[in-house]
Image (spheres, rainbow, N blue to C red):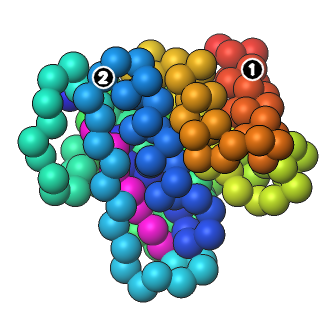
Amino acid sequence: MFQVRIHGRGGQGVVSAAEMLSVAAFEDGKHSQAVPSFGSERMGAPVVAYVRIDDKDIELREPVLEPDLLIVQDPTLFSAIDVFAGLKEDGFLIVNTSRTMKELGLDEQAMKLPADRIMTVPATELALRYLGRPTPNTVLLGALTAINDNVNLASVFKAIDHKFPGKVGELNKAAAQAAHDTVKSKG
C-alpha cells in the first residue's frame, strides 16, 4: 500500500488535493481512499489529509502515520508541527517552495531521504501564473506524477476535470502540466 499525507493550510485545497489524488488512482485502476482531517476549520489553520493507494481493497480508515510520500503545501508548517513524523526512510517529499531545503533550514532532515525523492516546486507561483489564485493543490499533483509512478498525469487530468469542469479545469491542468515539466527538467 502506498500512503500519502498532505499538509497545508485552510484555503489551499488540501482536502481537494487528496480527493483528486484518490480519483486519479482510481482512474488508473487502483483502489484508493482519501481521508480529510480537520482541526479548527478556518482559513489559514493547519489542515492535513491522507490518501491510500493499493492494488487491493483498503480496509484501514485511520490517519496515515507512516507515509511513503509527504506533500507540503505551505513550508511555514515545518516550524509549527513535525511534518516529517513517520516519513519512511525511502519516502518522497514534495514541498511548495522556490527555496532550497538548506534555505528552509531542513537540509539535515532532507539528507535522511534519497536525493532523487526530494522535490521543491514553486507551486504557488505556478498557480498564480496559470490560475490567478494561490492554490497549489493541482500544481503539486502534477509534480507528484513526475517523481512517482503510483498515478500518471493523464489520470490526474481526469480527476481535475471531474472536480473542476470547463475553463477552471483547463487552467488547473495547464498548471499541473507546468509543474510536471518543471520537475522533469530538474531530474
Identify the image quadrant of the C terminus: top right
**Closer to the camera, 186 or 69?**
69
Secondary structure of the residue carrying numbered label 2: loop
Q: Indicate yes or no whether the magenta region holds residue 47.
A: yes
Per the image, the residue denoted by label 1 is 181
Q: Horizontal and vertical percent for residue 149? A: 44, 16
Per the image, the residue denoted by label 2 is 30
Q: Which amino acid does label 1 sit on?
A: Asp
Q: Indicate yes or no whether the magenta region holds residue 48.
A: yes
Identify the image quadrant of the N terminus: top left
Chain-order first, disc 1 or disc 2: 2
Please, is residue 159 above or below residue 6 in the view? above
Secondary structure of the residue carrying numbered label 1: helix
Q: Which amino acid does label 2 sit on?
A: Lys
Q: Distance between the residues labelled 1 and 2?
A: 25 Å
- Which residue is the extreme one toward the left? 59
The stretch of residues the image draws in magenta is 46-52
Q: Residues within 10 Å of mark 2 (few under 14, many from 20)?
A: some
The prevailing secondary structure element of the residues shown in magenta is strand
Q: In this view, does 159 lie to the left or right of 114?
A: right
Q: How crowded is mark 1: few (under 14 residues within 10 Å), some or many (20 or more)?
A: some
Q: Horizontal and vertical percent for residue 17? A: 52, 48
Q: In this view, does 65 lie to the left or right of 128?
A: left
Please give the name of the residue rendered at 68% of the width and 16% of the height, measured from the top-left corner. Answer: 184
Please give the name of the residue rendered at 34% of the width and 48% of the height, measured from the top-left corner. Answer: 34
Picture quarter containing residue 150? top left
